[in-house]
Image: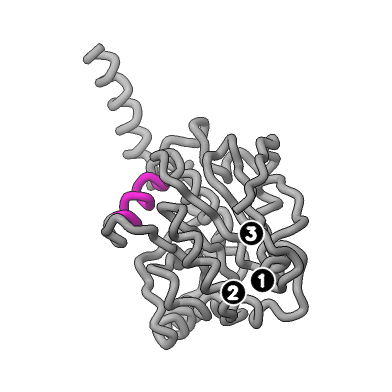
Amino acid sequence: MKKKNNAQKQTAPKQMLLSSKSPFTMQEAYKTLRTNVEFSLPGGDCKCIGVTSANRGEGKSTVSINLAISLAQLKKRVILIDCDLRLPTVIAKLNLSNTDGLSNYLSGMISEIPITHISNRGFDIIPSGVIPPDATTLINSDTMLKLVEQLKESYDYIIIDFPPVNIVSDAVLISSSVDGYILVVRHEYSEYQKITEAIRQMRFADAKIIGFVYNGLDIGRKYYKKNRYYKNNYYYYKKDKE
């Protein structure tokens, strides 16, 4: 597998992508998500995690990237696959060019797996590639299944950013190779009936839902006051111990 190296400056809004400069509550939220994923999928083998949502605009791609960053912070070998072949957003958030990617490989246009290393984030990525005429056929192929199995030999975690479940069926087409799914819902945006429908479709396909991410809550709200209090007191506790 040939890798490209990419250390381009991130141009996505700073508050969206996880870093050491992210708000304390955001960092802690993704540490909690990371821990929950690890406990939900025990074992020493590679874990393949699908991230999806009921509909568009709920923040699944940002969650996919930040989960990859969080796992990479533990020195885990992580690869993120942008599997939203119709309307990809991962590459834009990471400021990457979308040349050869997953669609090119699955369609046989290229023979090498198009892996790019994000050196300043610590994980690898397979971009979506050119937008194909029939994305469902490419994802629901033996080549896609073989790709996931091949990647499992080299990584600790495979994160797959899938399209929304209620729009297309892509997320559940390879559920047999995905160890667990995370369903992203957005504060004051996601609708109960649509979430219920997404869960129904995933269960019908025997897709294992390991949890939900409640996304989009304003970290400046009163719900986080106690976290700010904890952060301040934890800081002074450390200073006293020093």
Describe the element under mark 1 as helix, strand or loop: helix
Residue assigned mark 2: 143
Residue range in magenta is 29-38
For image coordinates 29% across by 55% down, the residue present is: 44
- Residue 22 is left or right of residue 134, and the answer is left
In the image, 231 versus 73, the foreground residue is 73
Where does residue 58 sit, x and y in percent of width and height? 56, 63
**Kind of residue at badge 3:** Ile
Secondary structure of the magenta portion, mostly? helix
Give yes or no for contact between labels 3 and 2 (Cβ–Cβ under 8 Å). Answer: no
Q: Does 34 appear in magenta?
A: yes
Residue assigned mark 3: 113
What is the spatial separation of the Cα atoms under label 3 and label 2, in whole angstroms?
A: 11 Å
Q: Is residue 129 visible?
A: yes
Describe the element under mark 2 as helix, strand or loop: helix
Residue assigned mark 1: 106
How many marks are shown on the rendered structure?
3
Where does residue 115 sit, x and y in percent of width and height? 62, 52
For image coordinates 71% across by 51% down, the residue present is: 92
Where does residue 214 sit, x and y in percent of width and height? 44, 59
Which colour assignment does the render follow?
one colour
Q: Earlier in the sequence, mark 1 or mark 3?
A: 1
In the image, 141 versus 70, the foreground residue is 141
Q: Does 37 appear in magenta?
A: yes
- Residue 166 is left or right of residue 76, and the answer is right
What is the spatial separation of the Cα atoms under label 1 and label 3, in whole angstroms?
A: 9 Å
**Kind of residue at badge 1:** Leu
In the image, 191 versus 83, the foreground residue is 83
**Kind of residue at badge 2:** Thr
Vertically, is 224 above or below 163?
above
What is the spatial separation of the Cα atoms under label 1 and label 2, in whole angstroms?
A: 6 Å
